[in-house]
Image (cartoon, helix red, strand yellow):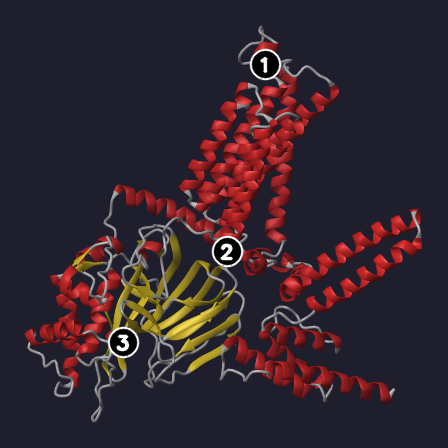
């Protein structure tokens, strides 16, 4: 029954308990849906869940009715089935969780029979806000969180008053006095200020690094169809094509003396992410290792330290420094984007393992998903004159996989430029002119488009682009130029990454977006020099990567300036920031170390640890139940059941303790356990090798060789710092650790 039916004389604008609670619930639901939609950038979620909530509200709560119980049960079964399917298809992700909660909220609005049902809708709204926070840390998501927190707090307070009034039998339509309204406002403000103060204290003093790896996998849900950077190119598929303005990186460009040299007029800088050398019918992928020996440098670089990779034997001095912040790096070995020739790479914040491929010039770092900062110092090869030493020979190029149509097309273009297409008779000094001729031909004779077409069956994608279609996006131009260079004997490769050209004059930093993803070519114009060439037409390139000044662009710059302050001041707040603000008062009181130990135990234990915990819980429950039954009934009847249960538990425990972890995880766990039992538990922040070297004098002499062997094997396996170990080597190292520990313990016992 509606309020108007119960009290026809009630004024339309009267402020009573039930109407106040209902209005607060509506706003809390709207805030929950909007917060997740803004954080995930999902228009589909907003339309589906938003319209569903609106329809459910108009059908039932807005009209004072409830849906039949059979319809409610059918809706719940459908939502549960949808949640199971989404989890099986996508895994337990934030997107799947939010859609499940949203659909559950729609069904719950059809069944608001008791006060507890209204409270559950507020709880579901709060769950959507939490999902939004786990999805994105942008300024828009932060503002939505603040607004939603205030609205949901208001709804909770009014719901508590409503529930107490229902339990006390009070008339819910009785209007509130002005004094009661003022008291409620004072209560809301006092609780809100208390929550703000407590939350600010937690933000300022709780270690931000605590649980970063555990929760990093929840961050950054996919945004629509935007793809951005890719370490593989397949022509005919979306690949790098993206028009999303979502920021990916923030870059500050400094000169050698430390001055900011970024500007609107500075030429675009190509940030290298992946180098692709193998081509197979329209697909470029990374080098598989056949036919060349590339030196890979891998080492743990502490905070403040650097790795100094090299590309050529020339002692080059760095000319430019880039301070790069990747807003949401992927988990595991993630590329560190660099430009030109990287000479020094230094992590900012905590140290991390960094590897460098000297042949490809690519850099990678071991990263928990989330924010990643580093500094790279570079040398620009275009500022040096091309040097060809006497007796230098052109590198041999494999042309076996190049279609005849591409080969003949390239030779024809080079010939028309008055350059010899035959590498056997062409001078090395003419290679750079041949590459420029091929680049200019593609720029001037072909057009750029983001529209893709299916490749005709039986045709090579690059050959079809050159001879028939003559229009495409950057991947086609890069593939065509690389293949044409190889056709005339010049080694070339496709490079994917981002183009840095969008400069913010207020913050003096470049913003690299998903739409800045690009593909270009590096050609080996001398035996020791690779130069960058981009065949994408210049006008289209400028339109995509260097937006023209406009009113809209100015407004976007203002918003991005505020967002940059949010990212650097709030999102990037960590232990170093706390120390710089509070000085000696910045101690975390051991919370980071204690929390790190707990998280590492859960992480390294993995699924077996969770299964063992679940098994213990089930065993305790079953034992308690059987004990109660035994007290009430005969002991002999349950003896056989208890014996069978014990045998089953022993078999289950044996199956769960079988090592199902990856080899490197088992080896690391064995090292940690051995060190702990020897009385030297390893701190979470210190690398394994540095810890063992520091404690070497205090460790038992018989245990040190086994620890050294196992640690070296762990570094080789996890970070590929050497040849891959033979099968069974890791198990042998684990057994050697156990036997060395046992012999050391036996000798200690005999000496006592």
What's the mark number on residue 339?
Answer: none
Residue 718 seen in render: yes
Give the image quarter of residue 464: bottom left
Residue assigned mark 1? 3
- Label 1 SS: helix
Q: What is the tally of numbered marks visible in this picture?
A: 3
Residue assigned mark 3? 381
Q: Residue at x 36, y 52 (%)?
A: 226
* Alpha-carbon span between mark 1 and mark 3: 78 Å
**Residue 539 image position (x, y, % from top left):** 17, 56
If the image is split into quadrants, where does the N terminus sit? top right
Residue 34 placement, left or right of 170: left
The tag earlier along the polypeptide, 3 or 2, is 3
695 in relation to 56, above or below = below
* Alpha-carbon span between mark 2 and mark 1: 51 Å
**Residue 262 image position (x, y, % from top left):** 31, 60
- Label 3 SS: helix
Residue 438 placement, left or right of 270: left
What's the mark number on residue 572?
Answer: 2
**Residue 313 image position (x, y, % from top left):** 34, 86
* Alpha-carbon span between mark 3 and mark 2: 34 Å
The tag earlier along the polypeptide, 2 or 1, is 1
Q: Residue at x 80, y 53 (%)?
A: 622
Nearest to the eye among marks 2 and 1: give it: 1
- Label 2 SS: loop
The tag earlier along the polypeptide, 1 or 3, is 1
Residue 287 placement, left or right of 403: right
Q: Nearer the viewer, residue 186 or 484?
A: 484
């Amino acid at each position: 029954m509606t309020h108007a039916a119960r009290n026809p004389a009630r004024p339309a604008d009267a402020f009573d308990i039930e109407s106040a609670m209902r209005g607060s619930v509506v706003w809390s639901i709207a805030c929950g849906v909007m917060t997740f939609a803004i954080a995930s950038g999902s228009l589909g979620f907003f339309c589906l869940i938003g319209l569903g909530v609106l329809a459910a509200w108009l059908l039932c709560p807005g009209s004072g009715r409830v849906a039949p119980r059979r319809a409610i049960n059918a809706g719940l079964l459908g939502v549960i089935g949808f949640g199971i399917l989404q989890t099986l298809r996508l895994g337990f992700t934030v997107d799947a969780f939010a859609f499940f909660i949203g659909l559950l909220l729609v069904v719950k609005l059809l069944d608001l029979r008791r006060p507890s049902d209204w409270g559950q809708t507020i709880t579901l709204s709060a769950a959507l806000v939490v999902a939004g926070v786990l999805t994105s840390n942008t300024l828009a998501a932060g503002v939505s969180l603040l607004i939603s927190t205030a609205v949901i707090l208001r709804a909770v307070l009014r719901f508590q008053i409503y529930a107490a009034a229902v339990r006390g039998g009070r008339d819910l339509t009785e209007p509130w006095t002005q004094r009661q309204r003022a008291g409620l406002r004072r209560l809301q403000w006092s609780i809100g200020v208390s929550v703000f103060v407590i939350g600010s204290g937690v933000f300022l003093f709780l270690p931000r690094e605590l649980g970063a790896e555990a929760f990093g996998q929840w961050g950054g849900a996919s945004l629509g169809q935007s793809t951005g950077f890719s370490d593989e190119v397949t022509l005919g598929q979306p690949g790098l094509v993206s028009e999303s303005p979502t920021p990916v990186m923030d870059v500050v460009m400094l000169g050698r003396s430390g001055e900011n040299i970024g500007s609107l007029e500075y030429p675009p800088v190509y940030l290298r992410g992946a180098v692709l050398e193998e081509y197979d019918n329209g697909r470029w992928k990374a080098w598989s290792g056949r036919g060349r020996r590339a030196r890979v440098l891998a080492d743990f670089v502490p905070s403040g330290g650097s790795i100094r990779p090299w590309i050529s034997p020339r002692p080059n001095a760095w000319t430019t420094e880039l301070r790069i912040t990747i807003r949401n790096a992927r988990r595991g070995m993630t590329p560190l984007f660099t430009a030109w020739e990287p000479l020094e790479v230094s992590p900012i914040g905590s140290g991390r393992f960094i590897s460098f491929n000297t042949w490809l010039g690519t850099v990678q770092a071991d990263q928990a998903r989330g924010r990643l900062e580093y500094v790279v110092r570079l040398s620009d090869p275009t500022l040096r004159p091309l040097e060809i030493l006497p007796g230098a020979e052109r590198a041999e190029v494999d042309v076996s996989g190049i279609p005849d149509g591409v080969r003949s097309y390239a030779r024809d273009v080079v010939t028309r430029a008055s350059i010899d297409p035959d590498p056997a008779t062409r001078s090395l000094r003419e290679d750079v002119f041949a590459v420029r001729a091929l680049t200019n031909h593609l720029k001037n004779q072909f057009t750029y488009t983001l529209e893709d077409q299916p490749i005709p069956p039986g045709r090579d994608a690059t050959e079809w682009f050159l001879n028939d279609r003559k229009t495409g996006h950057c991947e086609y131009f890069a593939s065509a130029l690389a293949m044409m260079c190889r056709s005339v004997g010049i080694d070339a490769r496709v490079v994917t990454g981002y183009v840095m050209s969008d400069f913010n004059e207020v913050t003096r930093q470049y913003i690299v977006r998903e739409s800045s993803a690009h593909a270009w070519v590096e050609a080996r114009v001398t035996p020791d020099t690779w130069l960058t060439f981009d065949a994408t037409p210049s006008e289209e390139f400028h339109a995509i990567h260097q937006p023209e000044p406009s009113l809209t662009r100015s407004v976007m710059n203002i918003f991005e300036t505020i967002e940059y302050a949010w990212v650097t001041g709030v999102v990037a707040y960590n232990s170093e920031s706390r120390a710089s603000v509070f000085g000696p008062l910045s101690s975390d009181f051991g919370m980071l170390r204690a929390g790190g130990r707990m998280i590492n135990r859960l992480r390294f234990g993995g699924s077996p640890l969770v299964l063992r915990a679940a098994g213990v819980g089930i065993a305790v429950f079953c034992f308690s139940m059987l004990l109660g039954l035994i007290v009430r009934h005969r002991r002999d009847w349950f003896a056989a059941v208890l014996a069978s249960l014990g045998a089953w538990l022993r078999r289950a425990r044996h199956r769960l303790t079988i090592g199902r972890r990856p080899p490197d995880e088992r080896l690391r766990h064995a090292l940690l356990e051995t060190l702990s039992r020897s009385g030297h538990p390893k701190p979470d922040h210190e690398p394994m090798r540095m810890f063992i070297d520091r404690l070497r004098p205090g460790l038992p002499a018989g245990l040190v060789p086994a620890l050294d062997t196992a640690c070296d094997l762990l570094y080789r396996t996890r970070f590929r710092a050497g040849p891959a170990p033979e099968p069974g080597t890791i198990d042998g190292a684990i057994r050697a650790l156990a036997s060395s520990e046992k012999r050391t313990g036996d000798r200690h016992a005999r000496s006592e």
